């Protein structure tokens, strides 16, 4: 067998790491062919690996066998190339290696390739469905590779930071008992215990609390979590969170650790200074000002309450809403009158109706005087008061919703984001963190008329609210907190209940009988009776941090093998059917769906 000249040769350098200072060195690089340019007596190949691209050069001085190999290669062939680094005759300023090229004297084809189903370029025009079907090819694109590399850096900084602050990384089980946590569990049938099921953890909540009881006073884990829920751009059925818990702490201690983490992370990975302490906002203020408990504070356009101004006006929609206990709220889209024509406002009205509003009133100030559909019902004094309250001036558009308070706020909160994107007023490369505090402990279910827990049942209420647990649940606030970044909820956490008597009281307030509480949570509440330290913590969404730090639009751009909207993975075809024999082992039968 004839030996190839490159048998036994090893890679010496990555493609994207070579620079002008390497001229004269003999190097060996490996990678994929980005493109091949045949100019007759000259052939250039752009060779790509995860660090970047380097140009390979073949000319009249190249060994003919090597030249013929270069002539035969095509896009996405895998090559090993050896040669001397030299200066390029035509510099390419768009890539870091643009000053040099490799004068190739050895070439080996390590793997041939079919013609790819789409261009392996950052700006490929291929649809997402096709790219996800061939995800292993999609991941060769430099923008996705850079995202995955940054994710690795984020995880490394995370582990380093928490290790330096005395946290122990401890793994918790993936196969656990199913307990109510707010979303559907993914269930795993047991072969040994037929008819019984494990669940995949929605979070390590109970285990990390048990670790506090076990004496590990500072725990962290980059934990895999699972929720069987409908997907969107910032949600996946399996996700990763930076999970942490601390003993002998109060809320300020948790905040201090979390703020130190984001300051270190953004400084080390992006070179961005995060000023601490981070701003804080109560849940009530967030809803009233931004219509959301995860406000994007990078721009103004706060919601204004004009109910007191219009409660006795001649426009029945406004006056009747206030009289029936509702509210009238408005936002001012500064300088939007040129962009938001009457036709554009009609589209906004349809958007508002699509999320539950009965309609959308507006004031558009394009001429010397503002115009609006309800002007004839209003006095000059009432209109002047609305202009003053909203800060309206020529060129602005005022959008008004009259409805029950929760709906009016949520509709304007959504329109606020829609309008800001349309106007292009959201600053890019700006990171606005805010803590959201003082969440209601209960929320009223409009259908049943009963109060339900907003958080998991181990969240502690604020001490001053405990007396209202049974009598006035709407006055009970949780010792819970969210960290929000640019309108995205990064993390959620709380201080925990450790008093068995209060925990029993809380289960009762949530409508759980003693038997149900014992069945679902007995192993945890039983542990509380053996000396439970005060503790609290949070889970920080690693995927969401990566999405924001890389400037990605979707979690799918920072997850190596993501799921699509119906929770399937297009590349492997999961989920899929299994053999009848496997189902038989598990004592499971598939029932036909009813039409």
Image (cartoon, rainbow, N blue to C red):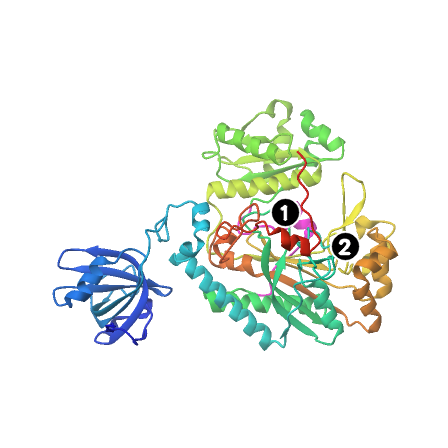
Observer-nearest residue: 202 or 469? 202
The residue stretch that appears in magenta: 276-300
Above or below, comparing residue 339 to residue 193 in the picture: above
Is 326 inside the magenta-drawn segment?
Answer: no
Task: Determine whether, in the image, residue 418 is placed left or right of residue 401.
Answer: left
At x 79%, y 65%, the residue is 524
Task: Determine whether, in the image, residue 328 is placed left or right of residue 520.
Answer: left
Q: Secondary structure at mark 1?
A: loop
- Report which quarter residue 9 is drawn in: bottom left
Q: Secondary structure at mark 2?
A: loop
Mark 1 → mark 2, Cα distance in angstroms: 17 Å
Q: What is the crowding at mark 1: few (fewer than 14 residues within 10 Å), some, or many (at least 20)? A: many
Where does residue 269 sit, x and y in percent of width and height? Answer: 47, 66
At x 58%, y 25%, the residue is 373
The label shown at residue 477 is: 2
Q: Residue at label 1? A: 292
Q: Earlier in the sequence, mark 1 or mark 2?
A: 1
Is 278 inside the magenta-drawn segment?
Answer: yes
Where does residue 271 sit, x and y in percent of width and height? Answer: 45, 66
């Amino acid at each position: 067998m004839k030996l190839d000249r490159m048998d036994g040769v090893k890679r010496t350098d990555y493609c994207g790491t070579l620079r002008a200072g390497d001229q004269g060195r003999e190097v060996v690089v490996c990678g994929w062919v980005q493109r091949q340019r045949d100019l007759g007596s000259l052939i250039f190949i752009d060779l790509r690996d995860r660090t970047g691209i380097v140009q390979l050069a073949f000319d009249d001085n190249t060994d003919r066998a090597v030249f013929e190999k270069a002539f035969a290669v095509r896009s996405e062939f895998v090559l090993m190339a050896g040669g001397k680094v030299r200066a390029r005759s035509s510099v390419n300023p768009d890539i870091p290696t643009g000053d040099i090229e490799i004068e190739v004297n050895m070439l080996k084809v390590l793997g041939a390739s079919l013609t790819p189903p789409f261009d392996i370029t950052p700006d490929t025009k291929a649809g997402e469905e096709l790219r996800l079907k061939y995800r292993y090819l999609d991941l060769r694109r430099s923008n996705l590779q850079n995202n995955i590399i940054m994710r690795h850096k984020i995880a490394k900084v995370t582990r380093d930071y928490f290790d330096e602050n005395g946290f122990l990384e401890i793994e918790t089980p993936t196969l656990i008992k199913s307990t109510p946590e707010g979303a559907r569990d993914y269930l795993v049938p047991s072969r040994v215990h037929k008819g019984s099921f494990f669940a995949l953890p929605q979070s390590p909540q109970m285990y990390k609390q048990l670790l506090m009881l076990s004496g590990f006073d500072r725990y962290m884990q980059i934990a895999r979590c699972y929720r069987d829920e409908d997907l969107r751009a910032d949600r996946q059925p399996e996700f990763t969170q930076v999970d942490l818990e601390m003993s002998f702490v109060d809320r300020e201690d948790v905040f201090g650790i979390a703020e130190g983490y984001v300051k270190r992370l953004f400084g080390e990975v992006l070179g961005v200074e995060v000023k601490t302490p981070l701003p804080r906002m109560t849940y009530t203020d967030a809803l009233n000002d931004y219509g959301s408990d995860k406000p994007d504070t990078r721009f103004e356009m706060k919601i204004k309450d004009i109910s007191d101004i219009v409660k006795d006006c001649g426009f029945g929609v406004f006056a009747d809403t206030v009289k029936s206990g509702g509210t009238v709220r408005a936002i001012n889209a500064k300088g939007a009158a040129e962009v938001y024509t009457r036709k554009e406002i009609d589209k906004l009205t349809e958007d508002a109706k699509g999320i539950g509003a009965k309609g959308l009133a507006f004031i558009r100030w394009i001429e010397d005087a503002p115009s609006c559909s309800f002007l004839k019902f209003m006095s000059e004094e009432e209109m002047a008061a609305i202009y003053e309250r909203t800060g309206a001036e020529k060129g602005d558009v005022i959008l008004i919703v009259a409805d029950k308070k929760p709906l009016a706020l949520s509709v304007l909160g959504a329109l606020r984001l829609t309008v800001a994107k349309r106007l292009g007023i959201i600053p890019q490369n700006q990171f606005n963190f805010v803590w959201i505090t003082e969440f209601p402990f209960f929320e009223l279910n409009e259908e049943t008329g009963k109060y339900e827990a907003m958080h998991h049942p181990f969240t502690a209420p604020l001490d001053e609210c405990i007396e209202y647990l049974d009598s006035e649940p709407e006055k009970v606030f949780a010792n819970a907190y969210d960290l929000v970044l640019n309108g995205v909820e990064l993390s959620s956490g709380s201080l925990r209940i450790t008093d068995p008597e209060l925990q029993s009281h809380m289960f009762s307030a949530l409508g759980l009988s003693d038997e149900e509480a014992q069945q679902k949570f007995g192993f945890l509440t039983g542990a509380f009776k053996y000396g439970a330290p005060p503790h609290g913590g949070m889970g920080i969404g690693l995927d969401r941090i990566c999405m924001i730090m890389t400037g990605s639009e979707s979690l799918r751009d920072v997850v190596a093998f993501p799921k699509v909207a119906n929770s399937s993975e297009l590349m492997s075809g999961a989920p899929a059917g299994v053999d009848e024999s496997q189902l038989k082992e598990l004592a499971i039968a598939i029932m036909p769906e009813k039409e």
